[in-house]
Image (cartoon, rainbow, N blue to C red):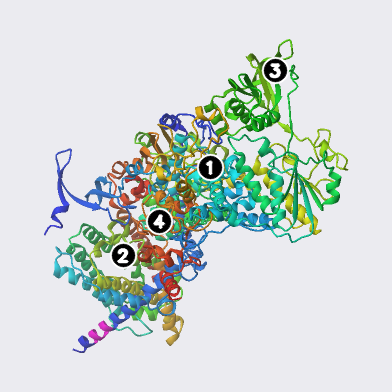
């Protein structure tokens, strides 16, 4: 009796050989698809011969919805783009609006934005590293990483009252100034976070099984990374030394001293470990920003409730936890954007999956998917 | 005839023992993994959440027994029992006290190693009968894995036969000497690792790999049939722990009478905990690496142990 | 290492920059966004060593893992605290929303207190973040919100009496005030500010119809008597407060009619004289003793007042116009602004009929002069000032009206020389281009260019400032003036160096607005009261609070319904109004005023007024608000917050001008309380205090609340 008639497919290879393949439908609801990704994989034994990501299960039409909302109302929508890193979407969008309408941003707001975005980077990378662990079966690492993420989320809750969809960065500044004692909490967190990072490094990245699972898997060459438009840790894991915070410095980033960790091999291990080391750098940036910050307004005063930028367009991008996140806005002079387009790093990175997964085993597929760290809110938009 | 009666009695006893072990084992694993993950674990039902597992059992019994539409119904139904029964049987030959094993047989070691291996058939059948790609892959993985790890596991207990000159567990327990512990250290490690692998527990839980195969061979099981799979897992854990504790550490020789049994229980619990500890510490291996470990690491190590013991035996 | 990858990184960077060109003036830190060369210093790639060491290293990594998890197992439980410890929520936690108060059922606080306690009231309200910006930004802290509330309820008398307590001449100020309240009005943020000043005027007009029924003299409860020199706004304000405190007050006015600068300086087309005198009459009916035509220092020496009264307040105002000493400034035809205005206001003829007039100066007085010149028959009126057109010191609406009427503005020119005929009559003016008025530090230091301009004119009016003329007033007393003719006065207590003699108004502050003068009058009254009571003048006294409010950028009116916009003050057409002194602003109708008052958002009152800005801001269309707007029946009829749509972005609460909409922090309300949110007042007003507990707790709390 055949296993399952419908999931078998006779495939003719280039050599004319007819191979019996097992077609497995991973997702859209699956423990390791990081949301609602569907991957149709063709298995020859345990070997993946073809992996085809199918996206769109989380498409909410955010770009279209934005055309019917005022500029301020779009900010909560951007929360739902990259829901693991809402601050980035907020910021990228607000930068475009500020560029479009020429809204000044107080310096303190820029510092607050840098601080929350670096905290967000930690939170997002903890999510990525934790799910790298969960994908490879290290559930405890997942909890340790989420413990760290929880601290960040609590800091965010203190700051803006929300734990996931912050709606914190607004055109012309940020919604709240730091509450009293928050800076000390952040400093205490970064200090504790460093030791937690070292522990995670030893527990997971130094482990023989992890290295066996992740090293040499899903190798992405630097040229391919650039050719495919990969950015963020995915590109840096392949040795592409490119980070918008350094290469297109925005906000107050030039005032900080930090490094860009890169990998050499471009495999899952390097991609995942780049994230871990970026957390160290984020801690450095946060501490410097807290030290440099001066009192002042956190939001440009007197902005009207409805922003009506002059007709024109603007694009601005920031380095999100997943790479270069850009928002393109077109204004027709009214109070609503004429068009919004999001350049989503997760989408570009996910496009690498078929190339990377081919020839690897089924177990590696989830590791590769995890190392690309897609967030489907941003992929599908 | 009396043998049949005793068989029924001991079979029931083993079932009850496994049920209790599963109840406590699940609770303890939840508590222990909770501690590792800085959580509390079950806490609401009973003291320290002890009755949580019982409540879960009631829930599982009451749940609908879902059978996939295209499943091979008969096979699907009996597969959990085929997994469970051999593991329950294996508990019969374990020495629970000095001079007492429910089934005192001269081929005890062989029985303990061979009988649970039958459960691999149940696992395969479960995976196959579900008509589900994930379950099928899980079943095939399980077959490859369990058969591979039979070898190092059996090799790791062979030194006892050499040292005691008997395959009867009671004889081995009686012949236990303290210096066996350092002598058999390598064998113990191999025994422990291959037992975990044999049980499909993390970090060797490929057949049921949550993140890849969702739940592997029992993906389509629910309710009491799923619970039987869980009981088989904890029964196997129990068997591996009690057998290892009795043979490798000789609790009955160290302490006389009831104290020895207490020590035996404690040692078993510690061994079970170590096996859980590994699950909650390490990532999962890949199938090819798993085979590599079995054939390239554990089997040579077991052979080295055998050679070591073989070199010592003539001097006894 | 990845150093070899610089080429690719540049490529990638170039692509990134290509989309993002365009300047960014407000960029902090890196305006040019020059890429930094970043050497790779952190390489993350790592592996075990080979050989036997690697073998042991591999086994060791397993033990290290056991060690880490084992240590954590022995450590404290930190990941999950709930529900063993109840989680304390951040005060900024958004959660479900509730209303603190509802229009129609909850009253808004009316800011009203004795003059001596009023500063304290404003200050504490401000500290509690309950002070509406219009009140905060008004120098005299007039409760414009209360006025809007009463007028909206068609209670014009209450509104007038409330406003009069701080702004003693609402009808007058309702026509001439420069309304800093409207500048700070929070409605600027949404569309256009409330017409607070026209509403003052409307309140007066309504009150005037029934004034006889409501005017009651203040009871004189104290023996002390106070004399006030001058009957301008500051003096009258001090008089009003002192009368309300029970003193007998006498005001000495040197002119035949009271009003001070309001009478002599403000042209009648802005302030009809009957309005001014009606309001001053009210004060007289309330107990003010007014002695007209008595010039202190001339008819009565100040020493007499000091001897006769227990306290004397000098509120004489500014009497003297400054004239720039350029060559030819003594020619016939060169005038000061105040004499010109007096002549125009009193006689209706300033001697400019058929002549060309050049006004030097860019302030409000200069604009008044120019407009008066038009009305008294000048054929051509030019206004020349040093400042550029966008930095003229006068109020923009003033110069706008003047330009409408035909005044020609010549900005960025300074007077160089008055050109005279042989018989010393003005024939023209030589002007010089002015490049900048203020230096970098903001001091007055004009920089002139090389461009000159000669203008033919018959009359030159200098309107470059006024000065006090107190020499007569203080003559014979031990009060002395500075070299510049100023009276030394304490700026906060308004005391002079003679005990019992105080000064207020423009004598102290220099040229300023009427409402600012009134504010000094209130302060002086407190000082006088404390002096007469023998209390320490400064101890425990709350200084007048001066909150700073951001200036609003102009809001776009796109998509704002006509019914929500500010009422248009009807104006006489420019060609009709430029010839005589009839009022320019024609006033609001009763219905217009009621609607305008209903536009008031009742800022910071913590009462929902159904302004619907929350609903308009909600990105999820989760809020529905309806209200009825009949006077006396104005209330919110429907407030539906659909929590199944709410995304907890918090924009609505942020928009709420009254702070009525707040987050409860009741996380569970989100899930459990869909039903009651279809407006159940108890539910929306329920106190959301406490901590997040289990869902059951929230429900139980609701039950007990309901049971109460």
Residue C41 visible, this orientation:
yes
Q: Which mark is in front, 2 or 3?
A: 3
Report whether A180 appears left or right of C302. left
Q: Are marks 2 and 3 on the same chain?
A: no
**Closest to the observer, A206 or B292:** A206
Q: Cα distance, mark 3 to mark 1?
A: 41 Å
> Which residue position is annotated with label 3?
C416
Contact check, label 3 and label 1, Cβ < 8 Å: no
> Which residue position is annotated with label 1?
A302
Tag 1 secondary structure? loop
Label 3 resides on the chain identified as C
**Closest to the observer, C4 or C426:** C426
Q: Residue at x 80, y 55 (%)?
A: C531
Q: Which mark is in front, 1 or 4?
A: 4
Q: Is residue B10 magenta?
A: yes
Q: Cα distance, mark 3 to mark 4?
A: 62 Å
Q: Is residue A110 magenta?
A: no
Q: Say whether disc 3 or disc 4 marks the residue closer to the N-terminus.
A: 3
Q: Position of residue A129 (x, y in %)?
A: 42, 52
Quadrant assignment, res B191: bottom left
Quadrant assignment, res C124: bottom right
Q: Residue at x 67, y 35 (%)?
A: C265
Report whether B66 appears left or right of C135. left
Q: Which residues are magenta?
A: B6-12
Report whether C524 appears left or right of C98. right
* Residue at the far bottom in the pictured view: B2
Q: Cα distance, mark 2 to mark 1?
A: 65 Å
Q: Position of residue A362 (x, y in %)?
A: 28, 51
> Which residue position is annotated with label 4?
C627
Q: Position of residue B82 (x, y in %)?
A: 21, 72
Q: Is residue B307 above or below residue A312?
A: below
Q: Specify the label residue B200 is tagged with.
A: 2
């Amino acid at each position: 009796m055949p296993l399952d008639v419908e999931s078998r497919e006779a495939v003719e290879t280039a050599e004319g050989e007819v191979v019996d393949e097992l077609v497995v439908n991973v997702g859209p609801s699956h423990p390791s698809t990081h949301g609602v990704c569907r991957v149709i994989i063709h298995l020859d034994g345990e070997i993946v011969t073809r992996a085809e990501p199918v996206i769109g299960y989380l498409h909410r039409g955010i770009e279209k919805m934005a055309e019917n909302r005022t500029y301020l109302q779009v900010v909560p929508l951007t929360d739902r783009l990259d829901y693991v890193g809402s601050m980035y979407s907020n910021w990228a969008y607000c930068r475009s609006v500020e560029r479009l309408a020429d809204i000044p941003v107080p310096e303190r707001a820029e510092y607050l934005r840098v601080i929350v975005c670096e905290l967000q980077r930690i939170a997002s990378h903890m999510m990525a590293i934790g799910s790298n662990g969960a994908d490879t079966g290290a559930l405890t690492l997942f909890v340790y990483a989420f413990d760290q993420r929880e601290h960040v989320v609590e800091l965010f809750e203190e700051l803006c009252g929300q734990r996931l969809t912050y709606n914190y960065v607004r055109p012309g500044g940020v919604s709240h100034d730091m509450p009293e004692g928050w800076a000390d909490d952040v400093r205490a967190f970064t200090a504790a976070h460093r030791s937690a990072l070292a522990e995670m490094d030893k527990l997971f990245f130094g482990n023989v099984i992890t290295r066996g699972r992740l090293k040499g898997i899903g190798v992405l060459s630097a040229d391919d990374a650039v050719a495919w438009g990969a950015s963020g840790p995915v590109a840096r894991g392949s040795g592409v030394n490119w980070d918008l915070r350094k290469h297109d410095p925005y906000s107050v980033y030039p005032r900080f001293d930090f490094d860009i960790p890169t990998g050499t091999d471009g495999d899952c291990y390097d991609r995942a470990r780049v994230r871990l080391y970026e957390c160290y750098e984020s801690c450095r940036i946060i501490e410097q920003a807290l030290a440099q910050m001066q009192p002042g307004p956190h939001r440009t005063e007197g902005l009207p409730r409805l922003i009506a930028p002059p007709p024109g367009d603007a694009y601005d991008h920031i380095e999100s936890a997943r790479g270069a996140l850009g928002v393109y806005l077109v204004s027709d002079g009214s109070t609503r954007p004429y068009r919004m387009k999001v350049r989503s790093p997760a989408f570009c990175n996910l496009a690498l999956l078929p190339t990377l997964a081919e020839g690897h085993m089924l177990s590696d597929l989830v590791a590769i998917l995890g190392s690309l760290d897609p967030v489907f809110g941003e992929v599908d938009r | 005839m009396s043998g049949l009666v005793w068989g029924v009695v001991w079979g029931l006893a083993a079932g009850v023992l496994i049920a209790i072990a599963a109840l406590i084992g699940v609770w303890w694993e939840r508590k222990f993994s909770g501690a590792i993950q800085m959580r509390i674990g079950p806490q609401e039902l009973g003291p320290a959440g002890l009755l949580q597992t019982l409540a879960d059992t009631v829930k599982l019994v009451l749940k609908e027994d879902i059978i996939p539409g295209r499943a091979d119904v008969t096979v699907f139904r009996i597969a959990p029992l085929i997994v469970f029964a051999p593991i329950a049987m294996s508990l019969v030959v374990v020495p629970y006290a000095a001079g007492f094993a429910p089934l005192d047989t001269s081929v005890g070691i062989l029985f303990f190693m061979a009988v649970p291996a039958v459960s691999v058939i149940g696992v395969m059948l479960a995976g196959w009968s579900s008509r589900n790609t994930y379950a099928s892959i899980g079943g095939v993985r399980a077959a490859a894995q369990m058969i591979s790890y039979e070898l190092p596991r059996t090799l790791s207990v062979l030194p006892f036969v050499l040292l005691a000159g008997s395959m009867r567990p009671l004889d081995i327990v009686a012949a236990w000497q303290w210096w066996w512990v350092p002598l058999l250290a390598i064998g113990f490690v191999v025994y422990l690792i291959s037992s975990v692998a044999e049980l499909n527990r993390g970090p060797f839980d490929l057949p049921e790999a949550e993140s890849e195969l969702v739940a592997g061979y029992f993906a389509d099981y629910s309710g009491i049939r799923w619970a039987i799979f869980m009981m088989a897992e904890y029964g196997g854990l129990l068997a591996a722990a009690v057998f290892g504790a009795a043979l490798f550490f000789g609790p009955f020789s160290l302490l006389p009478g009831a104290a020895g049994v207490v020590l035996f229980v404690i040692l078993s619990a510690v061994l079970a905990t170590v096996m859980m500890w590994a699950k909650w510490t390490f990532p999962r291996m890949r199938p090819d690496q798993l085979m590599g470990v079995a054939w390239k690491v554990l089997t040579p190590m077991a052979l080295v142990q055998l050679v070591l013991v073989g070199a010592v035996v003539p001097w006894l | 290492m990845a150093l070899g990858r610089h080429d690719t990184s540049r490529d990638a960077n170039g692509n990134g920059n290509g989309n993002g060109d365009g300047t960014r003036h407000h960029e902090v830190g890196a305006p040019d966004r020059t890429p930094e060369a970043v050497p790779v210093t952190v390489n993350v790639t790592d592996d075990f060593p080979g050989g036997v060491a690697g073998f042991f290293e591999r086994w060791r990594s397993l033990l290290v893992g056991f060690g880490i998890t084992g240590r954590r197992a022995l450590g404290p439980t930190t990941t999950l605290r709930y529900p063993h410890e109840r989680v304390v929520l951040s005060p900024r936690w958004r959660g479900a929303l509730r209303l603190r108060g509802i229009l129609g059922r909850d009253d808004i606080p009316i800011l009203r207190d004795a003059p001596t306690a009023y500063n304290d009231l404003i200050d504490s309200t401000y500290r509690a973040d309950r002070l509406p910006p219009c009140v905060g930004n008004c120098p005299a802290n007039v409760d414009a919100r209360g006025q809007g509330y009463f007028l909206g309820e068609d209670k014009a008398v209450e509104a007038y009496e409330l406003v009069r307590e701080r702004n003693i001449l609402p009808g007058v100020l309702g026509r001439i005030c420069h309304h800093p309240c409207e500048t700070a009005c929070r409605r600027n943020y949404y569309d256009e500010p409330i017409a607070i000043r026209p509403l003052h005027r409307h309140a007066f007009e309504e009150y005037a119809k029934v004034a006889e029924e409501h005017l009651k003299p203040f009871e004189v409860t104290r023996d002390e008597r106070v004399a006030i020199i001058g009957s301008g706004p500051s003096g009258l304000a001090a008089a009003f407060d002192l009368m309300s405190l029970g003193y007998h007050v006498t005001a000495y006015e040197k002119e035949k009619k009271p009003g001070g600068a309001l009478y002599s300086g403000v042209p009648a087309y802005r302030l009809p004289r009957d309005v001014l005198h009606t309001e001053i009459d009210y004060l007289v009916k309330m107990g003010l003793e007014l002695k007209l035509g008595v010039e202190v220092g001339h008819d009565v020496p100040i020493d007499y007042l000091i001897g006769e009264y227990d306290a004397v307040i000098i509120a004489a105002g500014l009497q003297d116009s400054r004239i720039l000493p350029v060559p030819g400034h003594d020619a016939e035809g060169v005038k000061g602004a105040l004499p010109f205005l007096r002549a125009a206001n009193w006689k209706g003829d300033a001697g400019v009929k058929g002549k060309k007039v050049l006004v030097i100066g860019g302030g409000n007085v200069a604009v008044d002069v120019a407009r008066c010149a038009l009305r008294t028959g000048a054929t051509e009126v030019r206004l020349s000032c040093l400042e550029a057109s966008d930095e003229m010191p006068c109020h923009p609406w003033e110069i706008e009206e003047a330009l409408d009427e035909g005044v020609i503005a010549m900005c960025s020119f300074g007077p160089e020389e008055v050109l005279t005929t042989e018989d010393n009559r003005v024939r023209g003016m030589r002007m010089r281009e002015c490049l900048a008025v203020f230096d970098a530090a903001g001091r007055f230091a004009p920089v002139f260019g090389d461009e000159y301009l000669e203008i033919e004119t018959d009359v030159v009016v200098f309107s470059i400032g006024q000065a006090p003329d107190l020499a007569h007033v203080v003559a014979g007393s031990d009060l002395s003036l500075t070299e510049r003719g100023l009276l030394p006065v304490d700026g906060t207590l308004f005391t002079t160096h003679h005990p019992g003699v105080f000064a207020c108004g423009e004598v102290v502050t220099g040229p300023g607005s009427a409402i600012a003068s009134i504010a000094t009058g209130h302060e002086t009254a407190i000082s006088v009261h404390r002096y007469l009571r023998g209390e320490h003048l400064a101890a425990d006294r709350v200084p007048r609070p001066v909150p700073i409010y951001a200036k609003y950028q102009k809001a776009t009116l796109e998509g704002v319904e006509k019914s929500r916009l500010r009422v248009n003050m009807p104006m006489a057409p420019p060609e009709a109004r430029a010839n005589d002194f009839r009022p320019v602003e024609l006033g609001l109708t009763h219905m217009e005023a009621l609607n305008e008052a209903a536009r008031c958002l009742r800022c910071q009152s913590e009462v929902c007024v159904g302004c619907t800005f929350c609903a308009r801001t909600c990105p999820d269309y989760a809020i529905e608000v309806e209200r009825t707007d009949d006077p006396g029946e104005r209330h919110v009829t429907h407030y539906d917050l659909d929590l199944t749509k709410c995304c907890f972005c918090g924009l609505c609460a942020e928009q709420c001008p009254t702070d009525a909409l707040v987050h409860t922090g009741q996380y569970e309300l989100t899930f459990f309380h869909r039903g009651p949110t279809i407006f159940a007042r108890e539910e929306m007003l329920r106190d959301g205090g406490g901590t997040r507990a289990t869902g059951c707790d929230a429900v139980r709390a609701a039950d007990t609340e309901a049971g109460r």
